[in-house]
Image (cartoon, rainbow, N blue to C red):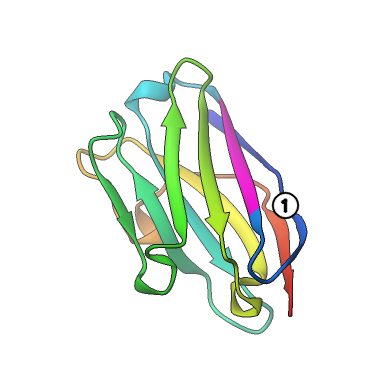
Amino acid sequence: QVQLVESGGGLVQAGGSLRLLCAAFGRAFSNLNIGWFRQAPGKEREFVAVISRTASTTTYTDPVKGRFTISRDNAKNTVYLQMNSPKPEDTAVYYCAADEAFSPSRRGTTYDYWGQGTQVTVSS
């Protein structure tokens, strides 16, 4: 079993920066791929970024490429999502998720464990 706890959300101005954290408890963190997803009001959940268990692979959805950076510190059992130059369209509840698949995935159905989410609101 894995418990994921997100933090770091809040209100940020467009063009500012924000860092989200995902802390994991339970299974060996280094065995987990960790993904970030988001869901805006009235929209479906969508993939944002994923990092493999060794951090050798990172993948981003096109709208955030060059602005967001996913990273991890296995010693601290934590994954980070650095959000630079956020835009109002980035406003959503952000969730981190974990799975033990061989390769990191963009598909939410792949993930076995989810956090409770953290709200990010970007003002224009």
Instruction: Say left or right for 18 vs 48.
Output: right
Which of these two is toward me, 123 or 38?
123
Which of these two is toward me, 109 or 6?
6
Q: Residue at x 39, y 62 (%)?
A: 66
Which of these two is toward me, 111 or 119?
119
Q: Residue furthest top?
A: 75
- Tally the marks: 1
Amino acid, disc 1? Gly
User: Does the magenta portion include 12?
Assistant: no
Position of residue 95 measured from the top left corner of the image (x, y, whole percent): 58, 53
- Circle 1 residue: 9
Task: Check disc 1: other Cα within 10 Å, few if <14, some if 14-19, many if 20+.
Answer: some
Q: Residue at x 23, y 36 (%)?
A: 56
Tell me if residue 93 can be seen.
Answer: yes
Q: Residue at x 26, y 40 (%)?
A: 101
Per the rendered image, the range of residues in magenta is: 18-24
Position of residue 123 measured from the top left corner of the image (x, y, whole percent): 76, 75
User: Magenta region's main secondary structure?
Assistant: strand
Q: Residue at x 29, y 53 (%)?
A: 105
Which of the 4 image quarters holds residue 89?
bottom right
